[in-house]
Image: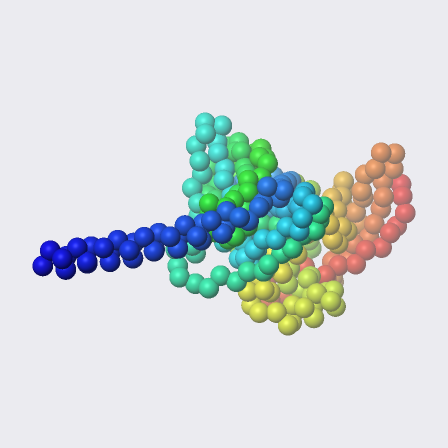
């Protein structure tokens, strides 16, 4: 009996030793991966006004760059869903750490297949992408935060391999009150953004331009049909038509981010010093609004004629396209 018990114990110890040995080999293999010559840096993608609220209404887009500073090829994995490749951390001036979003926690604790790509960077090469920090962290209160990113070159499940970025100072301001935007539909008291109203095409254009003048992006996009604007370019339209629903949503978000960063279609996001609505023509479903806009430079004004194309669906008019004519200077 004692001999059998000793054999069982010895067998159990052997299997335990084997299991720990396998884990040790796995960690040792990961440890061999050299990321000492990799750097991760972040900067704000749009540098606009940030407020508490949802990731869709007032995103905090951050531009992430991974660079190979060494003499050898740098290889790492990058998940299609960046939640499995990166983490944002934010601290208040009192060193209080922000909580992660519930959606991020659910995503990481649910069994699912994580799709990723192998990225190779030669010496001096960089790889960049843009992420919304509000998809990772709860920015519920106005404050000054210190924001940084942690990148996992072997994905989130191998968290002991990580690269930390530089730190940014992020100011989240109180939500604008109703008094600060008299032309913009916000709910009194709570400053909650209302749903689009059934207003005329000229009022739609007026509110959109005023929102841009005040750098209120969530309200600026309230009456803009981003999907139709995106599809105005033939190449984007073809790619959009061939994409899945998830990829289409990402394309729209990327297009919105590019507009906010003033990297594409600069005419539509340009900020006029003043404007005057000249003509409004519309039928039951389609219309145009012609606006003269003045853009201030150091010694002169540039004058342009904008034609906004609007379409009505379910009683709501939205801008789906535009044209611009230069009218000289004053």
Q: Can residue 314 be seen in this snapshot?
A: no
Residue 285, how many percent across, how many down? 66, 68
Q: Residue at x 34, y 56 (%)?
A: 18
Residue drawn at (76%, 50%), measured in percent from left and top?
Answer: 266
Against 24, residue 139 (above or below) is: above
Outermost bottom residue: 242
Q: Quadrant of residue 256?
A: bottom right
Q: For residue 45, which quarter of the picture?
A: top right
List x then y, in percent, for residue 276. Answer: 77, 47
User: What is the quadrant of the C terminus in the image?
Assistant: top right
Give the camera-side residue of 37 and 153.
37
Specify whether 323 is left or right of 167: right
In the displayed image of the protein, which residue is found farthest to the front? Answer: 3
Q: Determine the residue located farthest toward the left in the rendered image.
A: 1
Q: Quadrant of residue 48?
A: top right
Q: Residue at x 72, y 46 (%)?
A: 124
Is 188 above or below relative to 278? above
Nearest to the observer: residue 194 or residue 117:
117
For the N terminus, which image quadrant? bottom left
- Residue 104's spot in the image, x, y percent? 45, 52
Q: Residue at x 55, y 49 (%)?
A: 33
């Amino acid at each position: 009996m004692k001999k059998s018990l000793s054999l069982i114990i010895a067998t159990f110890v052997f299997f335990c030793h084997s299991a720990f040995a396998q884990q040790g080999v796995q960690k040792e293999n990961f440890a061999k991966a050299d990321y000492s010559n990799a750097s991760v840096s972040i900067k704000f993608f749009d540098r606009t006004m940030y407020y508490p609220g949802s990731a869709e209404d007032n995103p905090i887009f951050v531009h992430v760059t991974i660079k190979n500073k060494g003499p050898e090829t740098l290889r790492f994995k990058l998940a299609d869903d960046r939640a499995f490749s990166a983490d944002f951390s934010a601290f208040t001036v009192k060193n209080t750490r922000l909580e992660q979003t519930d959606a991020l926690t659910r995503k990481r604790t649910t069994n699912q297949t994580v799709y990723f790509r192998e990225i190779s960077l030669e010496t001096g090469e960089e790889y960049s992408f843009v992420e919304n920090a509000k998809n990772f962290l709860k920015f519920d209160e106005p404050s000054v935060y210190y924001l940084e990113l942690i990148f996992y070159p072997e994905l989130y499940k191998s968290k002991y391999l990580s690269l930390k970025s530089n730190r940014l100072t992020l100011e989240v301001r109180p939500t604008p009150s109703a008094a600060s935007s008299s032309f913009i539909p916000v709910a009194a008291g709570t400053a909650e953004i209302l749903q689009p109203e059934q207003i005329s095409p000229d009022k739609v254009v007026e509110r959109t331009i005023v929102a841009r003048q005040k750098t209120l992006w969530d309200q600026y996009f309230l009456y803009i049909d981003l999907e139709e604007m995106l599809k105005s370019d033939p190449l984007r339209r073809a790619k959009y038509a061939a994409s899945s629903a998830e990829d289409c949503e990402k394309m729209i978000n990327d297009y919105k981010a590019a507009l906010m960063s003033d990297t594409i279609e600069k005419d539509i996001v340009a900020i006029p010093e003043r404007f005057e609505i000249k003509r409004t023509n519309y039928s039951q479903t389609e219309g145009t609004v012609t606006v003269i806009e003045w853009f201030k430079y150091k010694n002169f004004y540039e004058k342009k004629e904008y034609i906004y194309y609007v379409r009505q669906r379910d009683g709501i008019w939205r801008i789906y396209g535009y044209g611009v004519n230069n009218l000289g200077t004053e």
